[in-house]
Amino acid sequence: MNTFDIGFEEIVSYLSRSGWQRSLVGPFAEVWHPADDEDASILVPKKPDAPDFPKTLHILTGELAKKEDRTPDEIRLEISRQFIDVTDLRAEDEQISDGTIPLLAGIGLFNSAHRLMVSAAAATLHRQGYYGSSMPRAAHKHARRMRLGQTRPGSYIIPVISNARFGELVDNRFDEPRIEARADDSYFERRMLTTLSGALEVLAEMTMVRDRAPTKDEMLGAVDEGVSSELCAAVLDVIGKGGVGVFDVTFNWAPTSPPPAATAGKIMFMGEAAELIHQVESELKEADAPAERILYGVIRRLSLKRNDTTGHVSMETVLDGKTRVVSFELPLDVYQRAARYHGERRPVVVRGILDATPGKRATMQVSAFDADRSVATFEDIE
């Protein structure tokens, strides 16, 4: 990160969340003070392209560092992260020191960053054990949105940066909840990282016990959580080909939005797990399992007739950039949850076999249904 990643909005967000308040407002700068100390103040520059912006920012972070008893670099980094999610990929090994890494290990780490994001994007669209030549083009497109930050000390860390500025997903101007297509697209990177976190956690748990290989059923079940042969290959780029002793992935969620529910903050892989992960990679590459589509949306309508064993649900989602209604049946216990989410106007996610033939009513044979836990508000977690 550097000072050019910080603008007026990032500074204001950080100060507001740290208990500061505005004192004076001007066209080029503002004065802020702590809520409990009106005599202390700092100058907040408003124009990042102004010649004195870096200097004023340097003074501001220095003053905040003194007040919070932290370093200016720590303050600057936290300010810069207000509207971005940062995923830290860290390699640790005896051969990594003084901010340098063996060439082969470094290549593996950078390759892993790309392959992790592509496999996560693919699993956010489709669940498959092996993509191969059927890797969705959209997976590469979405992965290209991500950016790499500068490497940092701490063994050897590569930060992957993604957008965390989200639009209003549900349009509440109508009697029935409606989805905002543009806002839905703004959540894709967050959904990617949610998928990645869950998939890596499952893979780590499966390969944690060194003297027992995961069963075939466990491997196939892991596909439901986003694990794929390509995801395994991405981890093996570091602890396999790269020969690194420890590889971990840490998710730093933007403070301006709540973190996805039930996600691990940090997942670790030891070099000793490489053989088991390679077994999972090979098994999934050969597995013959149907690909399932993932859809995100809001429930438009529900219907349940007396004595029926399933309830009918119509969900509005986004397919190929356009809104479309998809219909499916849910067993009664799951239907009750769907009815609650509908009343809350809460976004949902479904997984299953989709039939979206043009000119026909889109339907899905659903194998999994839940709230979209990658999308939340602070009110949801209070």
Image (tube, helix red, strand yellow):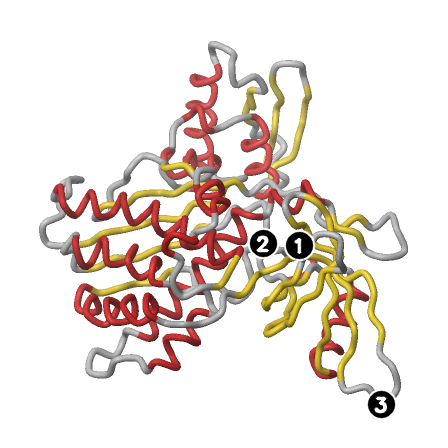
Task: Tell me: 278 left or right of 165.
Answer: left
Position of residue 143 in the picture relative to residue 255 (left or right): left
Residue type at mark 3: give it. Asn
Foreground residue among 203 and 357:
357
Task: Please tell me whether residue 36 is drawn above or below residue 40 in the rendered image.
Answer: below
At label 1, the amino acid type is Thr
Residue under numbered circle 1: 377
Write the residue at 44% across / 72% down. 289
Mark 2, other Cα within 10 Å: few <14 / some 14–19 / many ≥20? some
Mark 2 or mark 3: name the one nearer the start of the chain.
2
Give the percent coordinates (x, y) of residue 172.
83, 50
Identify which residue, 200 or 351, lies in the foreground. 351
Q: Residues within 10 Å of mark 1 (few under 14, many from 20)?
A: few
Secondary element type, mark 2: loop
Q: Which residue is mark 2?
A: 258
69 shown above or below 246: above
Query: Which residue in the rendered view is the most extreme toward the bottom?
Result: 307
Name which residue type carries label 2: Pro
What mark, if any, has residue 307 been given in the picture?
Answer: 3
Return the disc, 3 or 1, that comes first in the chain's sequence: 3
Tell me if mark 3 has few (under 14), some (14-19) or many (20+) residues whose alpha carbon lies within 10 angstroms of its own. Answer: few
Which quadrant would residue 1 be assigned to in this image? top left
Q: Quadrant of the C terminus?
A: bottom right
Pick whichever of labels 1 and 2 is earlier in the sequence: 2
Q: CA distance from mark 2 to mark 3?
A: 40 Å
The answer to whether the residues at label 1 and label 2 have Cβ atoms under 8 Å apart is yes
Visible residue check, residue 43: yes
Residue 101 placed where, x, y %?
Answer: 15, 43
Tell me what residue is drawn at x 58 percent, y 54 percent.
Answer: 258
Kindly identify which numbered label has been placed on residue 212: none
Between marks 2 and 3 in the image, the one whose residue lies nearer the viewer: 3
The residue located at (82%, 70%) in the rendering is 302
